[in-house]
Image (cartoon, rainbow, N blue to C red):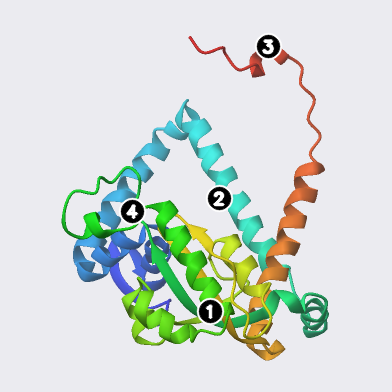
Amino acid sequence: MAPDTVVAIVDGRKVTAGDLEVVLRAVAPATRQVARRSSLQFLQQYGLLRRLAEMAEKNRLHERSPLREQLEYNRMLAMAQAQLNEAQNQITVSPEEARQHYEAHKANYAQARVKVLYIPFRSESSPATDGQAATALTESEAKAKAEALLKQARSGADFVALIKQHSGDPISREKGGDFGVIRRSDNLPEEVKAAVFGLKLGEISDPVRQPNGYYLFRLEELREQPFEEVQSQIVDQLRQQKFNEWMQATQSSIEIKVENEAFFQTAAPQ
């Protein structure tokens, strides 16, 4: 519906679809959904809200504390957010900038395909009572087993066969240890990424300890993601970097002089 379409008359004044849409955009998403489902009820609430606001203005409540200060703060907050949005919208990253960043940081866009052999261990705080806990390895036992399997694999034993016989990860075990693709940007522990990307093709890592067990990784494939695959990611990264620099410059440009240091001193804990 066109924004200038009149949808109601409230207190003798026309209300357009655009008027109500402006209000809807300002409320929380959950409230917006409820309002759209019960549009007539929302119109009644809008009418009441406008009437009360007009009454408050007539009574000059906006000139009284603390409402006056609250309105000033809310205006400052809204204007500040608008300026942040404007600053972000003004930031551009050219294709040349993105390409230069890619060429200078190609290592960051490497991705590795690996096979993994996982030896779990039980937590020291989990008592070995019965069932699965009773058969789970301690950390030292798991480490010793991982080192023994690594020795076998590096001596020529079939790594996939070792995975199918010993790995504690049933999902990757069924797939011969396939772990999928690991990227440097993935949300994985740094020690895992360091081990994987430090390997040569076909090499097997030393045991990598994690809170739940030890991992052996074998590098199956290492490739760099083409620029076209990561261009949008690079653009977003550079835009955020430029915005952060703008924010830091803005913050640094603010001149502040403390006139009463006692006011800003943190009270000692009681």
Q: Residue at x 55, y 61 (%)?
A: 189
Say what amino acid the circle numbered 3 marks. Ala
Any mark on residue 256, and which? none
Residues at marks 3 and 1, CA–CA distance in whole angstroms:
68 Å
In the rendered image, residue 136, in percent from the top left (x then y), is placed at 29, 58
> What residue would you read off at disc 2?
78
In this rendering, the label closer to the viewer, 3 or 4? 4
Residues at marks 4 and 1, CA–CA distance in whole angstroms:
24 Å
> What residue would you read off at disc 4?
122
SS at mark 1 in the image:
helix
Say what amino acid the circle numbered 1 marks. Ala
In the rendered image, residue 140, in percent from the top left (x then y), is placed at 44, 52
Please tell me which of labels 3 and 4 falls first in the chain.
4
SS at mark 4 in the image:
loop
**Tags 4 and 1 touching, CB below 8 Å:** no
Near mark 3 (Cα within 10 A), the count class, few <14, some 14-19 or many ≥20, is: few
Above or below for 257 versus 16: above
SS at mark 2 in the image:
helix
